[in-house]
Each structure stands twice: as C-alpha cells, then as structure tokens.
C-alpha cells in the first residue's frame, strides 16, 4: 500500500513552513488541546480516521460547546447519522489532547450547513484563547468515489471558505479501495486473476498518483487551496505525522 508519508504540497507560498518534530511536541505542550475540524462526505471514513489517530476502537465522548457531556442516549442516536452538530466536541479517552469537530460534506447542497461551517471556522480561527482555537482542518475525500473525487461541494469549500492561518489538509481516505480498481483494470487488459493480484499493488500506486494529481490540479486552482494532500493507507498511527506537517 502507499506509504503514509507520501504527500503532495501546494504552492510554496501556502506550504513553506513546517514544524520539525521537536517544535511540534513543544507546540502541543503549549496549546494543551489540539482542535481539529473534520469535513467530509458521509462515506469518507471519518470515524475510522479519528479512532486511528487516537489509537482506539472506542467511540468518543461528546461534549457541547460549554463543556457539558452529551447524554449517552443522544450520542448513540447521532452515531449512525454522523456527529453533525459542528459545535460538539469529540474527545477520545485514549488521547484527550485531541478535540475534534465534525462537519458533514455539502453534497446535499445545504446553504445553511455551509454558512454554519464558515461561521464556526471564522469564530474558532480567531479565538483569543488557544484552547478554543482550531489548529487544523482535515477535508476527507474517499477513494471509493475516485470517479467523482472533486464535486461541486469541494470546489465551493475551497473557493468560498477563507480559513485564514488555519491549514487545510486534504486526506485521501479509503485508499485501499483502489486495489479493487487496479485488479479490475488488469483483468480488463487480459491478465488472469492470479497475475492481476500480483501486479495490483504497482497498478494501485499508479492509480493513486493519477487521482491525487487530478484532485490537486482542480483544487489548487481554487481561491483558497489546501496546504497539502495526504493519502491514507494501512493501519499505523498517523497523528504525529499530520501534526509535523502543519
């Protein structure tokens, strides 16, 4: 599978500064809570990503904007539909240093949800206290939808949402799905199944490069392009790598 370290950066002006590991650790110690807004379609695998970051299979505790824990019955009712109260804080017991906010994708075309998200970004990007400020935005695009990787929703976000100094990272999720696409391509070319499986890994890498380049080409032309692009594959811990890339 693709190395988690594979990234494509945007223009130098958007990606010129990166914290080294030691600086990143010191930064985390100073801010106490690393607050992340996670955006993506319903099938983007956002919950799985957060669990991987926090090294757990457990569900998060959810708190309202005032720090009050949301009752378990409410939490269970929201899990199946996603966590789409953007003001709610998602905290995993295994890694309480991360605070997550979940926003749905905007494929449904909800102007109200989009404006709510923009207000949240503005309020928390300029918060006077570090613990209330968002430090990163992760925009998830699933590779299960590789034929429609960039929709009108993504273009709307990157053209209209000015996140200021808050970096936006595009996470290409469910990269493993490209393995099936690779096998299908090879079978269509006339290879037998066993041969196709043997060649699939190399073809998968080529497909990922193709679609990642396609996504970058479109989004880099937007008014507020992402800072970088990061494909996710495998099951290793990835939170530190993301932090260091900020």
Image (cartoon, rainbow, N blue to C red):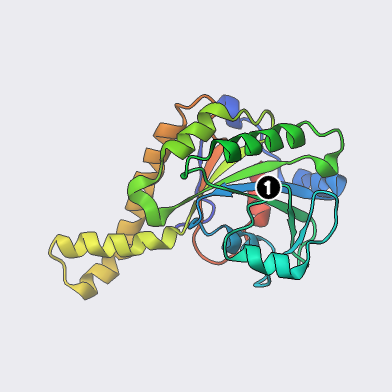
232 and 67: which one is in front? 67
- Residue at the limit of the structure toward the left, as seen here: 190
Quarter that holds the N terminus = bottom left
Q: Residue at x 54, y 39 (%)?
A: 228
116 and 26: which one is in front? 116
Q: Residue at x 62, y 34 (%)?
A: 115
Q: Residue at x 72, y 41 (%)?
A: 135
Q: Position of residue 7 (x, y in %)?
A: 51, 45
160 and 180: which one is in front? 160
Q: Position of residue 158 (x, y in %)?
A: 52, 32
Does any portion of residue 11 appear in the rendered image?
no
In this rendering, position of residue 242 left or right of residue 198: right
183 and 16: which one is in front? 183
Q: Residue at x 53, y 55 (%)?
A: 4
Quarter that holds the C terminus = top right
Q: Position of residue 75 (x, y in %)?
A: 70, 65
In this rendering, position of residue 124 left or right of residue 50: right
In this rendering, position of residue 211 left or right of residue 7: left
Q: Position of residue 31 (x, y in %)?
A: 84, 45
Name the residue carrying label 1. 86
Eyeballing the image, is 235 above or below 150? below
């Amino acid at each position: 599978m693709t190395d988690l370290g594979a990234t494509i950066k945007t223009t130098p002006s958007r990606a010129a500064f990166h914290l080294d590991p030691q600086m990143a650790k010191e930064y985390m110690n100073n801010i106490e809570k690393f607050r992340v807004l996670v955006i993506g379609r319903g099938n983007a695998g956002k919950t799985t990503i957060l669990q991987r970051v926090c090294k757990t299979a457990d569900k998060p505790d959810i708190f309202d904007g005032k720090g009050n824990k949301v009752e378990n019955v409410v939490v269970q009712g929201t899990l199946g539909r996603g966590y789409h109260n953007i003001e709610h804080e998602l905290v995993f017991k295994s890694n309480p240093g991360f605070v997550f906010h979940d926003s749905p994708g905007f494929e449904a075309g909800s102007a109200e949800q989009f404006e709510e998200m923009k207000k949240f970004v503005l309020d928390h990007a300029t918060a006077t206290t570090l613990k209330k400020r968002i430090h990163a935005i992760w925009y998830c695009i699933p590779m299960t939808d590789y034929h429609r990787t960039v929709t009108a929703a993504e273009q709307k976000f990157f053209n209209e949402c000015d996140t200021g100094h808050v970096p936006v990272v595009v996470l290409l999720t469910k990269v493993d799905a490209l393995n099936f696409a690779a096998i299908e391509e090879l079978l269509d070319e006339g290879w037998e199944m066993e041969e196709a499986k043997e060649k699939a890994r190399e073809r998968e890498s080529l497909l990922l490069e193709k679609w990642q380049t396609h996504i970058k080409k479109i989004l880099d032309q937007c008014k507020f392009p992402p800072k970088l692009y990061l494909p996710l594959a495998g099951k290793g811990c990835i939170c530190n790598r993301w932090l260091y890339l900020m």
